[in-house]
Image (tube, rainbow, N blue to C red):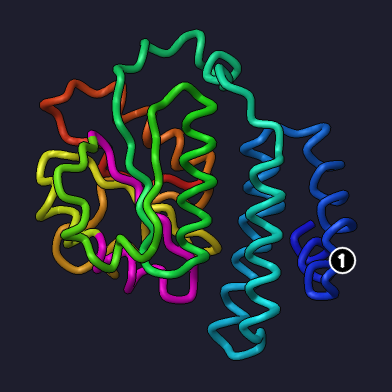
C-alpha cells in the first residue's frame, strides 16, 4: 500500500494517491488506514530525504499531500466505544495529552495525526509544531498529563532521546510515551539506545501508542505510566 501511494505522489499524482488511501479507508478503521497507508508512506519519504534521494520541492509535495489526505480520512468523534475491549475496560480519567514532534516536519505530521486519532477516541489531545520543540522554553505554562513523542527513522532514537530528556525536566510527573515510526526491529531489545531515563513506553504504530495512552489514563494519577515497550 505505502509503495503504491508513494510512487503516485512522487509522480505528483495527488488524486490517484488519495483514491488509493480512501478506497482502503472504506473497509478499515482510521487507525488501520493511518498505520497501513499514511505513516509508512511518510516514513519512506523521510528516509529518502535523509539519504539525499528526494529534493526539497518533491518532499514538500509529498508531505503536504499526506497531510491533506490524513485530515480527510474519516475519523469520527466518539470512536472510543468501538475500540476492541472498550466496553470491558475501566472508564479512563480525563487527561490532557501533548503530542510532541522529535525534530523534523515529518515528526510534526506524525504528531498531528496522532493527536487527531486520540481526539477521535475522546481524549483531549493537541500537537506542537516542530519549531516549538526546538525551543522548549516556549511551552511556558503548557499543561500536559501525558506526553507523546513522534519520531521517524532514521534518526528516531537520537531526536526522541533528546526531546525525552528535556520533557523529563519540564514535566517530571507526566508519563512520556514514544512513537518510533518506521522502526521494524523488536522495540524491547533496543530500549538501551535511550541513555539515562527512557520513555515509559515505546510503540511502533499509532494504534499501539493509543493503547499506551489509554493504559496511562486508566492508571491512578500518582502512579507511573507503563514501562514495557509495546509492539504490534
**Residue 54 drawn above or below residue 44:** below
Q: Which residue was labeled with disc 1?
A: 13
Can you see residue 67?
yes
Give the residue drawn at x 24%, y 24%.
Answer: 219
Instruction: Judge the density around disc 1: few (<14), some (14-19), many (≥20) Cα neighbours within 10 Å.
Output: some
Question: Based on the displayed image, in which of its 4 quarters is residue 97 positioned?
Answer: top left
Image position of 140 (left or right of 36): left
Q: Is residue 128 magenta?
A: no
Residue 26 at x, y percent in the picture: 83, 33
Residue 79 at x, y percent in the picture: 58, 20
The image quadrant where one finds the C terminus is top right
Image position of 58 (left or right of 175): right
Residue 33 at x, y percent in the picture: 70, 43
**Residue 44 drawn above or below residue 86:** below
Q: Nearer the viewer, residue 24 or 85?
A: 24
- Counting labels gives 1
Please identify the residue farthest to the bottom as the structure is shown.
52
**Residue 130 drawn above or below residue 98:** below
Residue 66 at x, y percent in the picture: 67, 57
Q: Is residue 151 magenta?
A: yes
Q: Secondary structure at mark 1?
A: loop
Give the residue drawn at x 17%, y 35%.
Answer: 224
The image quadrant where one finds the N terminus is bottom right
Image position of 8 (left or right of 103): right
Q: Please state the extent of the stretch shown in magenta in the rendering.
A: 145-163
Give the residue drawn at x 46%, y 36%.
Answer: 210
Image position of 134 (left or right of 31): left
Can you see residue 187?
no
Give the residue drawn at x 67%, y 40%.
Answer: 32
Question: Based on the displayed image, in which of its 4 quarters is residue 11 positioned?
Answer: bottom right
**Residue 183 drawn above or below residue 18:** below
Question: Based on the displayed image, in which of its 4 quarters is residue 146 positioned?
Answer: top left
Amino acid at each position: 500500500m505505502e509503495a503504491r501511494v508513494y510512487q503516485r505522489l512522487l509522480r505528483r499524482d495527488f488524486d490517484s494517491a488519495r483514491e488509493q488511501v480512501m478506497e482502503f479507508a472504506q473497509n478499515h478503521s482510521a487507525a488501520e488506514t493511518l498505520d497501513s497507508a499514511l505513516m509508512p508512506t511518510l516514513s519512506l519519504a523521510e528516509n529518502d530525504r535523509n539519504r539525499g534521494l528526494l529534493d526539497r520541492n518533491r518532499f514538500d509535495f509529498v508531505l503536504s499531500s499526506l497531510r491533506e489526505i490524513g485530515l480527510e480520512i474519516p475519523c469520527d468523534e466518539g470512536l472510543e466505544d468501538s475500540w476492541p475491549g472498550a466496553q470491558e475496560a475501566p472508564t479512563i480519567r480525563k487527561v490532557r495529552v501533548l503530542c510532541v514532534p522529535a525534530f523534523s516536519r515529518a515528526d510534526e505530521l506524525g504528531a498531528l495525526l496522532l493527536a487527531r486519532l486520540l481526539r477521535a477516541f475522546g481524549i483531549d489531545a493537541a500537537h506542537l509544531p516542530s519549531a516549538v520543540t526546538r525551543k522548549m522554553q516556549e511551552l511556558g505554562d503548557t499543561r500536559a498529563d501525558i506526553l507523546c513523542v513522534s519520531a521517524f527513522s532514521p534518526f528516531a532514537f537520537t531526536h526522541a532521546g533528546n526531546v525525552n530528556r528535556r520533557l523529563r525536566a519540564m514535566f517530571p510527573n507526566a508519563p512520556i510515551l514514544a512513537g518510533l515510526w518506521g522502526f521494524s526491529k523488536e522495540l524491547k531489545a533496543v530500549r538501551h539506545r535511550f541513555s539515562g531515563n527512557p520513555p515509559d513506553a515505546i510503540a511502533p504504530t499509532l494504534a499501539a501508542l493509543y493503547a499506551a495512552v489509554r493504559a496511562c489514563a486508566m492508571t491512578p494519577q500518582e502512579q507511573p505510566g507503563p514501562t514495557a515497550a509495546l509492539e504490534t
